[in-house]
């Protein structure tokens, strides 16, 4: 089943700062980051993030893109979704947008990337998604969204033997 | 890797968790950044997590370590409930 990977790119006003060793505190101290808009109306504002998480049943905030993840944990999320046959989802590369990168952490009150949202609701990061995949919860959650996991078909084939 | 040696970071994080989760039956903190204090793996078992969704359990840990997390690059959390 060939799916279409749709990625929505968020290009922030500020250039991507290739700063190694970024801390999770990500101090939103106004101009310190040299980032674009602050607070209201910016790409990292509560309203902007709210709009993004509701855009699609499956929304992922990650480093890099599904075609080219730039972090092991983000890659894990992409691979897990792929296993379930979920290739059509919204992926946002936080490395392209420092405001979004901080905004999404404020929104979910969660310090790390990647972040997975199902039906607008924050589900967790890579570890939680992996757990859900292993205990069958992910198949259930996808079903609630009207998405049939590819693994169900794989299981059926096995049972036949 | 010797069981007796623990980095300062691991000890500190473990201490904070012990204070914030007095009911915890098991706490294990491992520095998975090669001793740099940049990334930790946290295993914690406690009654406090019963009846809570995984993401909520993890939020509790995030909250407890909010100060320590500021200087980390990443962390992995594994919560469980005593049998």
Image (spheres, grey):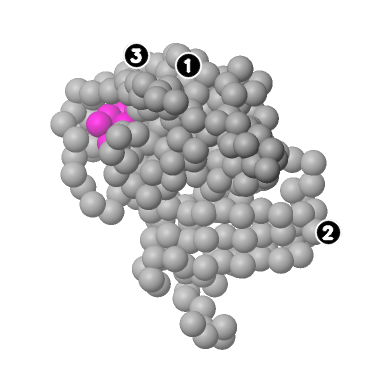
- The quarter of the picture where residue A97 lies is top left
The secondary structure that dominates the magenta segment is: helix
**Lateral position of residue A23 relative to residue B83, left or right:** left
- The quarter of the picture where residue A142 lies is top right
Q: Residues within 10 Å of mark 1 (few under 14, many from 20)?
A: some
Above or below, comparing residue A7 to residue B18 in the picture? above
User: Which residues are the magenta region?
Assistant: A93-100
| Residue found farthest to the left | A15
Above or below, comparing residue A46 to residue A27 in the picture? above
Q: CA distance from mark 3 to mark 2?
A: 48 Å
Residue A35: % across, % down: 23, 30
User: Which of the labelled discs sits on residue A41, or is there none?
Assistant: 3
Name the residue that disc number 1 marks: A56
Nearer to me, B21 or A128:
A128
Q: Secondary structure at mark 1?
A: loop
Q: Which chain does the numbered disc 2 sit on? A: B
Residue A104: % across, % down: 43, 30
Q: Secondary structure at mark 2?
A: loop
Residue B46: say if magenta.
no
Q: Which chain does the numbered disc 1 sit on? A: A
Residue B10: % across, % down: 51, 70
Above or below, comparing residue B35 to residue B54 in the picture? below
**Residues at discs 3 and 2 in contact (Cβ within 8 Å):** no
Q: CA distance from mark 1 to mark 3?
A: 21 Å
Q: Which chain does the numbered disc 3 sit on? A: A
Nearer to me, B82 or A107:
B82
Name the residue that disc number 2 marks: B83
């Amino acid at each position: 089943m060939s799916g279409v990977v749709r990625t929505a790119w968020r290009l922030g006003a500020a250039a991507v700062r290739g700063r190694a060793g970024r801390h999770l505190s990500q101090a939103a101290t106004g101009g310190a980051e040299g980032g674009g808009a602050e607070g209201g109306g910016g790409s990292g504002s509560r309203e902007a993030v709210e709009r993004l998480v509701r855009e699609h049943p499956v929304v992922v905030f990650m480093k890099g893109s599904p075609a080219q993840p730039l972090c092991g944990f983000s890659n894990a999320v992409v691979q897990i979704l792929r296993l379930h046959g979920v290739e059509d989802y919204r992926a946002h590369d936080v490395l392209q947008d420092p405001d979004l990168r901080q905004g999404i952490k404020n929104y979910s009150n969660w310090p790390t990337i990647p972040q997975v949202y199902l039906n607008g609701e924050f589900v967790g990061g890579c570890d939680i998604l992996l757990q859900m995949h292993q205990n069958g919860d992910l198949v259930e959650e996808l079903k609630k969204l009207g998405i049939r996991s590819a693994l169900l078909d794989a299981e059926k084939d096995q049972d036949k033997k | 890797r010797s069981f007796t040696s623990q980095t300062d970071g691991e000890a500190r994080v473990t201490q904070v968790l012990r204070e914030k989760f007095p009911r915890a039956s098991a706490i294990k903190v491992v520095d998975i950044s090669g001793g740099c204090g940049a990334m930790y793996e946290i295993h914690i078992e406690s009654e406090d997590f019963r009846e809570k969704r995984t993401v909520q359990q993890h939020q509790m840990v995030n909250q407890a370590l909010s100060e320590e997390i500021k200087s980390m690059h990443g962390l992995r959390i594994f919560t469980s409930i005593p049998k």
